[in-house]
Amino acid sequence: MPDSPPPSRGAPDGVLLVNLGTPEAPTPAALKAYLREFLADPRVVDLPRWLWLPILHGIILRTRPARSAALYRKVWTEAGAPLLAIGRAQAAGVAAVLRGRGSDAPVALGMRYGNPSIAHALTDLRDRGCARVVVVPLFPQYSIATTLSVEDALKAATRRLPGCPAWEMVADYHDHPGYLAALAHSVREAWERGGRGGHLLISFHGTPLRYRDAKGDPYFGQCQATALALAGRLGLAERDWTLTFQSRFGPEEWLQPYTDATLDRLAGDGVQAVDVVCPGFAADCLETLEEIAMGCARAFALEGGGRLRYIPALNTRPDHLAALADVAARALSRAG
């Protein structure tokens, strides 16, 4: 943790939930602003700046915003971006759980990219009297590209924000019993409602392979641990499920097996019903709603498969909110 002013006696502790972020609107202009911030982060794209920035500004930001805006329009709601609307409800829900347990800790939501920013959320908690904050990135599995980037933003806010609260960050909760139980319950409930598919894909967001092999990123191992624990709780045999990785872009090799390629193989093998759950996403977003529930379902059918059912993210399920409150409360007790 960076150096921060010592907490005042009697000052309340706060909780900051952080997710990745979302554009302000499903428009090319809003996507350009969002992608400029997101793709300029060296944790996300770690190529040399002299090489990457001309590509980003000269090619990607000229072509990708319009395509991305069209995708966002497919999932946009009256409440705005699903990730933001769900995130706000999660913050309110975690606060309610903590109050029910006798804690008056304020809970705020911050986004790594876009609004409300991490700095804005810290300012809000400071203004609500918090001298110490527990930060819970809503990335159950630790990754350099996400969790460490949140830490970068926290350090930058600490330098800029007068009276910034002291903070402690939760690194991950990939093996938290409450989180795993909520995942298992969500899958069982989907099976009870609509029957069990012929195969379960446990799909995580991918990262470049070299993050694991050259940088020692623990993400792959934590995804494996979560998937194995979930399969165990569901009583699945090895042949009944597959760990996969989605959302890759660019020419280099990413973590495998790939979700889309695995679905093609299953369709070719004659599997007619597939369920997909995405444990790395705490809230539904473009990558789950458009990429998996729409795009992968369509591609699976075109390859000769049958039904692809996406099992929603944990979102505001009561057992998920309770698990997040457990994670925050444990860190609050250490910080205190």
Image (cartoon, rainbow, N blue to C red):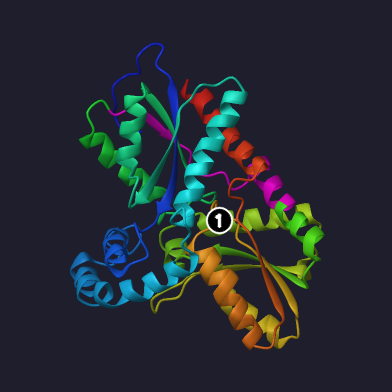
Q: Position of residue 137 (x, y in %)?
A: 46, 44
Q: Is residue 242 above or below residue 305?
A: above
Q: Position of residue 233 (x, y in %)?
A: 77, 52
Q: Is residue 82 above or below residue 52?
A: above
Residue 103 magenta-highlighted: no
Q: Quadrant location of residue 265?
A: bottom right
Q: Position of residue 232 (x, y in %)?
A: 76, 55
Q: Position of residue 60 (x, y in %)?
A: 28, 74
Residue 138 in view in this figure: no
Q: Residues within 10 Å of mark 1 (few under 14, many from 20)?
A: many
Quick one: which residue is furthest to the top in this view? 9
Nearer the observer, 197 or 180: 197
Quick one: which residue is furthest to the front in this view? 78
189 relative position to 151: left or right: right
Nearer the observer, 229 or 135: 135
Which residue is identified by label 1?
Answer: 280
Task: Give the magenta-colored segment's residue range.
Answer: 164-185
17 relative position to 101: left or right: left
Residue at image coords 52%, 71% = 291
Residue 170 magenta-highlighted: yes
Residue at image coords 30%, 32% = 123
Q: Is residue 145 above or below residue 9?
A: below
Residue at image coords 58%, 57% = 223
Q: Is residue 57 above or below residue 147?
A: below
Count the numbered circles shown: 1
Nearer the observer, 138 or 314: 314
Residue 241 in view in this figure: yes
Q: Of the residues shown, which amino acid type is indicated by label 1?
A: Gly
Task: Determine whether the residue tagged by mark 1 lies in a helix, strand or loop.
Answer: loop
Residue at image coords 43%, 44% = 18
Quarter occupied by the N terminus: top left
